[in-house]
Image (spheres, grey):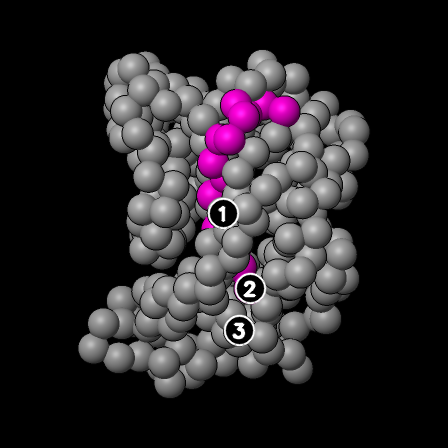
Amino acid sequence: MTQEGPNAAQAAYWNGPATRAWAREHERIDARFAPILDLLLARAAPRPGEHVLDIGCGSGTSTIALAERVGLGGRVLGVDIAAESVEVARRRIAAAGLVQAEALLADAAAHPFPPGGFDLLASRFGVMFFEEPVAAFAHLRAALRPGARLVLAAFRAAAENAWTTGAAAAMRDLIPPQPSPGPEEPGQFAFADPARVERILHGAGFAEVALAPEDVPIRLGADAAEATDFAMTLGQVSRALQGAPVEMREAVRHRLLAFYRAMEGPGGVVMPAAIWLVTARG
């Protein structure tokens, strides 16, 4: 896709080398986030025959799950800005024979969706990256039928999500410092402030906005070695190690093993993810 428009920087990032692992490692990512997707689906309660817009569909797991629930009489359109992830989603949808599902490579903030065509807007961690979020959500609301439901999963504050920030903090003296987005800038924790989320959605014309906190245990690995391997493949530590010398990578690996060994339990390395389940009406 062309990297133009208000989300050009995000398009460049999500189609760059730092994020390709989201497509390659989708099975491990999906395993981690499965409890969160279950919560999202339970809250969204997609019904047979409904039309659903899935924002930030990634490699297609949420789109497939939604399509199974709406059945042949419904339709699910998954949208993502990352080309490799969308290609994976398309292959998986075809393999599953879900003719009611489609994965679209597009910027959801600007794509010309048919007006009033969807009963539900859902997203698992796909809406925190809009450069102009009020305009983006107003654009998405125009694609919804009056009274349509919105259900989003988004992360709470970085300080509440040690499963992803703790490892990077423990490596602070070993890895280069990484830029941290401001509270009004796109990023993993851009929806941390509930007042900001309410301001965005109300500003875009949504009603009945509510945020419910959930603390969801996620399994980072069967043991410290698996959790370490994943942290060096995807996430804050892996991004900091892009192009790093072998000596630095090995020092980080050794430190990560110690960090995750302290977190090991009978179920492996399990830590809570602090999220919001955001609901609203179009």
- The circle drawn on residue 160 is 3
Q: Residue 48 is drawn in which quadrant?
A: top left
Which callout, 1 or 2, points at the residue further toward the start of the chain? 2
Query: Disc 1 marks which amino acid?
Result: Thr
For image coordinates 53% across by 38% down, the residue present is 281
Residue on which disc 2 sits: 156
Dot 3 alpha-carbon crowd within 10 angstroms: few under 14, some 14 to 19, many 20 or more:
some
Seen in the picture, residue 223 relative to 15 is either above or below; the reply is: below
For the N terminus, the image quarter is top right
Q: Which of 10/193 is in front?
A: 193
Query: Disc 3 marks which amino acid?
Result: Glu
In three-dimensional space, the C-alpha distance between marks 2 and 3, rounded to whole angstroms, equals 7 Å
Q: For the residues labelled 2 and 3, say whether their Cβ atoms are less than 8 Å apart.
A: yes
Q: Is residue 25 left or right of residue 240?
A: left
Of all residues, the one furthest to the left in this rendering is: 266
Q: Secondary structure at mark 1?
A: strand
Residue on which disc 1 sits: 279
